Amino acid sequence: MNYTPERIKIGEGKISGLFAIFFASLSFLALLCFRFPEQLTTPDLRAAYSGELAGKLLFCGIIASFIFALASFLISKKKRYAVIALIIACLTIVLGGFNVEGQAVDKVNWSLGLDWLVLDLLLMAVLFVPIELVFPQNIDQTKFHDEWRTDFVYFIISHLFIQFFGVVTKKPAEAFFGWMELSALRDWIEGLPFVVELFFALVLTDVFQYWAHRIFHSHHFLWRFHAVHHSTKTMDWLAGSRTHFVDIFVTRSMSYMPLYILGFSTITFNTYIVFIAIHAVLIHANTSINFGVLKYIITTPQYHHWHHCEDPKHYGKNFAVVFPFIDMIFGTFYLPGKVWPKRTGLAEASFPKGFIRQTIYPFRTNPFKNLLKEDEKSKR
Ligand SMILES: [Zn+2]
Ligand SMILES: [Zn+2]
């Protein structure tokens, strides 16, 4: 018999215990960033925050872990979570968590994005854990379902290697368009008002993303790799992280091509990155938030959940990540009123569990059990 994990109930002290561990662990990782900034922080991201701000966040993180641990102690019969959190928080303090200072950082060629991991995880958890608790779509779904650990590993890996992915996804744009003289076009784009430039960047990248995404669905060999993203049965704010590195490389290289070629301003580029980072998480989240009539202007969780629908009748819909009108133009739009798909995932494929096995699997084996001959196109 399959064991289905139950949704954690409010008032048992388990949630506060987990929050305590979460804040204590993030504080410890933030302290490591202060201790080893050359190896563990991202040069581009460091430019966006000061050491002082990061130090204040670290201070708040330690205090938050103590408050939640205390709450868990008072409410819960089991003290395990609170004790684990207190050990990590105390270790962070002993190693200097209350006395950190920003320092000049030597330039190194490669570093891990631990600061990006800590900050983005904090932001996403603060935004989406409450949203999924208060406005869930599937009310019985727990955060700690069978697949969450695998999705979390994808989240960690894609954040730690952000610098590597940034460099390699730029390469195709440089190789194909680096020789072109585009300064007049770039000057024109730089002269546009910020809002127009941002809209322009979003539409262009979404059209490029649309076609990269559709090619992944329609070519049998590429579909093996993108199918990893579709393999999750449990949609939530971590589920979108499950993406094979081949998929990340090709789709991101294609989508970002207009940004790299046309030389959008730094503020536009950074706003785009922040918007996409939040929006991509939102559309996978387990939430019924649906934006009213705006759902025809911008994609919603309902919209993207239909893209992940398990039922073959609805395959090959809703490829756009931001603008539904792109699917309307190319004939792949599907949004049936207030109806949501009954199930998400891949009925006909069998992927192994775990990040490493899922990474290797599509290179070696066709995960689809039937129907697809090697020379056939995917029907998705
Ligand atoms: Zn897809
Ligand atoms: Zn998706």
Image (spheres, rainbow, N blue to C red):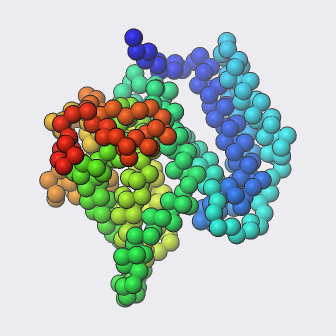
In the rendered image, residue 263, in percent from the top left (x then y), is placed at 43, 77
| Residue 288 seen in the figure | no
Q: Residue at x 51, y 66 (%)?
A: 167
Q: Nearer the viewer, residue 319 or 248?
A: 248
In the rendered image, residue 200, in percent from the top left (x then y), is placed at 33, 69
| Residue 29 seen in the figure | yes
Please give left or right for residue 184 compared with residue 354 in the image.
left
- 4, above or below 300, in the image: above
- 87, above or below 265, in the image: above
Q: Nearer the viewer, residue 6 or 152?
A: 152
Please give left or right for residue 260 compared with residue 337 in the image.
right
| Quadrant for the C terminus in the image | top left
- 346, above or below 259, in the image: above
Please give left or right for residue 298 compared with residue 93 in the image.
left
Q: Residue at x 41, y 46 (%)?
A: 243
Q: Residue at x 40, y 70 (%)?
A: 172
